Image (tube, rainbow, N blue to C red):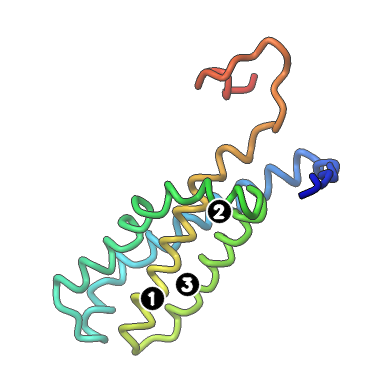
Amino acid sequence: MPKRDRVIRPLPPVWVMAVALVAVAANLRIAITSIPPLLDAISADLGLSHAAAGALTTLPVLCMGLFAPVASRIAHHLGAAGAVLGAVLAILVGTASRLAGGNVVVLYVGTFVCGVGIAVAGTLLPGSSRPSSRPSGRGSSPASTCWP
């Protein structure tokens, strides 16, 4: 199979990348932090038990633990930027589906989709924010990922 040449595109300006990084990072937490303040109202409206309400708040954290290791494989197939974009779209779809209200299954599925998106984006975002090539003389130690 012939090897395809990759087209290297110039990066956008630093300020655009910084704004995008902050916007994505801010949206990673909304799906998790929006449920606990409303948990009593959600439980009362949908008739959830305490265990079911606890599962609702635990589901995104569980997804982060289960799907964060898979993020590198997704990035390998889609590229880091494509994987982060897909993760942000998953968070958008999951959050929007939770607005349906009145349906317990949709609430849990939306929370699950948000959790998967948060796991993938949260894993890949720090690595995609640094330059892709290292200056000569830099090693591959964890300290070398801190750019001056």
Q: Residue furthest front?
A: 1
Dividing the picture into quadrants, the one containing residue 110 is bottom left
Is residue 142 or residue 73 the one in the foreground? Answer: 73
Kind of residue at disc 3: Gly
Q: Amino acid at mark 1?
A: Val
Nearer the camera: disc 2 or disc 3: 2
> Is the residue 118 above or below the residue 69 in the image?
below
Specify the amino acid type for callout 2. Ile
Task: Identify the residue under disc 3.
Answer: 94
Which residue lies at the image location 25% right of the left edge and 86% below the top edge? 46
Point 70% across, 31% down: residue: 131
| Circle nearer the viewer, 2 or 1 | 2
Quarter of the figure that contains the C terminus: top right
Measure the C-alpha gap from mark 2 to mark 1. Answer: 21 Å
Q: Mark 1: which secondary structure?
A: helix
Which residue is at a point 22% across and 74% down the rendered structure image?
40
- Between 136 and 13, which is closer to the camera in this rendering? 136
Q: Secondary structure at mark 3?
A: helix
* Residue 128: quadrant of the picture: top right
Query: Relative to 23, is 10 above or below?
Result: above
Q: Which mark is residue 109?
A: 1
**Up-down: is 97 above or below 132?**
below
Seen in the image, is 122 located left or right of residue 139? left
Image x and y of residue 28, in percent:
49, 55
Please identify the residue farthest to the bottom as the structure is shown. Answer: 102
Q: List x then y, in percent, for residue 62.
A: 31, 57
Q: Position of residue 116 (x, y in %)?
A: 44, 61
Q: Are marks 2 and 3 in contact (CB under 8 Å)?
A: no
Badge 2 is on which residue? 74
In the image, which disc is placed on residue 124?
none
Q: Tag 1 or tag 2, which sits nearer the N-term?
A: 2
Q: Residues within 10 Å of mark 2 (few under 14, many from 20)?
A: some
